[in-house]
Amino acid sequence: MSIPKLSDYKAVVGRDVVEELYILASHVGNRSIKMVNSTAVGGGVAEMLHRVVPLLNELGIATTWDVIKGGADFFDITKAFHNALQGKEGHFGEEVFKTYLAYNEMNYHELEFEEDLIVIHDPQPAAMIHWKKNRKNRWVWRCHIDMSHPNQQLWEFLRPYVEQYDGAIFSSPLFSPELNITQYRFYPSIDPLADKNRDLEAAYVEGVLEKYEIPTDKPIITQISRYDPWKDPVGVIEAFKMARKYVDCRLLMVGDKAADDPEAEEILAKVNDAAGDDPDIKIIFLLNSIPTEINAFQRASDVVLQKSLREGFALTVSEALWKHRPVIGGAVGGIPAQIIHGYTGMLVHSVEGASLQIRTLLKQPELAKRLGDNGHQRVKDEFLITKLLKRYLLLLVALDHPGQPTILME
Ligand code: UDP
């Protein structure tokens, strides 16, 4: 498949949506953006940047993407930061902050920041701004994580760096901390034409199931997520085991490893323990997953789970809804924006709740179909990449008019 061009999206979202982007881009004029994050593969941020960057370029906004570097010590720290910002208790020593800042300073000096807008994604590179003196361009911090219950010690350390930005983007009002800079609010998006989401031949889907030795004799319940405690993979296994007492089904757990994630193997071991030698549980761990295969796993699923305990957004939810799958999601972070309970999916608060919804959806295929169809429409209206492109264009305009405390970018 050739790489999709903007004009290809007309067939998905309508001609007017794509034309509006070109009109907006012409008003924005000759601008440039640099995106900076901490991994080129694995996780939702890298997933999005791979598509947003070329499409912004197509709109005439010269956009580049740099990935910061760090040793294992740095990524251990930034994973601990990620966990703490999502609410994990703990205390950080001064050495930790020193190491974090040393890597940020090093990366700052290795990169160039000539573009009109610098978008720094997530906490890993957030402090780099500190070394930028006399800047003429704008810097925005894009926070993708669930900051509804941040560890206060860490947040008090990071906040002075965040407040050096011209603005910060959060996905949800639930995550917005008090800041003395303008906040912008918008959700991430998925690309309907990327290999992860585009239509697939049924034979290809079958081939993927065969390759991974997944029988199709029973309904398939799937969770596709990094092996991360916030994704609650052990809770998924418990919910599945409870549900299976009433409805026969198989559980498929798929996860790959983000390059900046030191925790995956440890969590995977716990998942294997919880699964035991249950023949109906298939656990797949991939170093680099293949997007069309993830797409196939989602399409082959009777029910998709995203039983997160904290969640910035969960692209996986939109991906599954886009494929008309009924989705059961943890009622946390960005998931309720995608799943309207009982209308575009089911929200749950516990293992028992997840188990009950698995049973309900497997026993009521008409309900499951209705949720999947409504979910597809919701994603089409709110969470496709064309909307995200529009928001970045509007951000460029909004940054020319600073001063408002929060700007919603609907
Ligand atoms: N993903 C993948 N392979 C895997 C697990 C996840 O390609 O084995 C993808 C998933 O399809 C989604 C992204 O990684 O596009 C995860 O984004 P999400 O927002 O759901 O979670 P994050 O990992 O950013 O917390």
Image (cartoon, grey):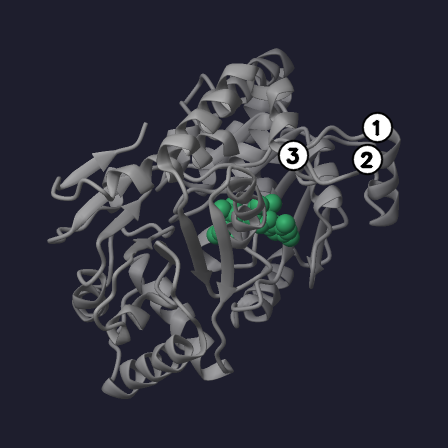
Spatial CA span between label 1 and label 2:
5 Å
Residue at horizontal 52 percent and vertical 68 percent from the top: 261
Of residue 72 and residue 359, the one placed in the foreground of this image is 72
Q: Looking at the rendering, in which quadrant would you find the C terminus?
A: top left
Q: What's the amino acid at mark 1?
A: Ala
Q: Circle 3 sits on which residue?
A: 5
Can residue 154 be seen here? The reply is: yes
Q: Circle 2 sits on which residue?
A: 205
Of residue 170 and residue 118, the one placed in the foreground of this image is 118
Lateral position of residue 230 relative to residue 166, left or right: right
Q: What's the amino acid at mark 3?
A: Lys
Residue 306 screen position, x and y as percent: 51, 41
The residue at the far front in this view is: 30
Q: Looking at the rendering, in which quadrant would you find the N terminus?
A: top right
Residue 392 screen position, x and y as percent: 39, 40
Residue at horizontal 54 percent and vertical 44 percent from the top: 57
For residue 79, which numbered disc appears in the image?
A: none
Q: Sequence order check: which comes first, mark 3 or mark 2?
A: 3
Residue at horizontal 13 percent and vertical 42 percent from the top: 405
For residue 202, which numbered disc appears in the image?
A: 1
Lateral position of residue 125 relative to residue 18, left or right: left
Under 8 Å from ligand 1: the CB of mark 1? no
Are the residues at dot 1 and dot 2 in contact (C-beta closer than 8 Å)? yes
Of residue 5 and residue 309, the one placed in the foreground of this image is 5
SS category of the residue bearing label 2: helix
SS category of the residue bearing label 1: helix
- Tell me: residue 154, above or below residue 328: below
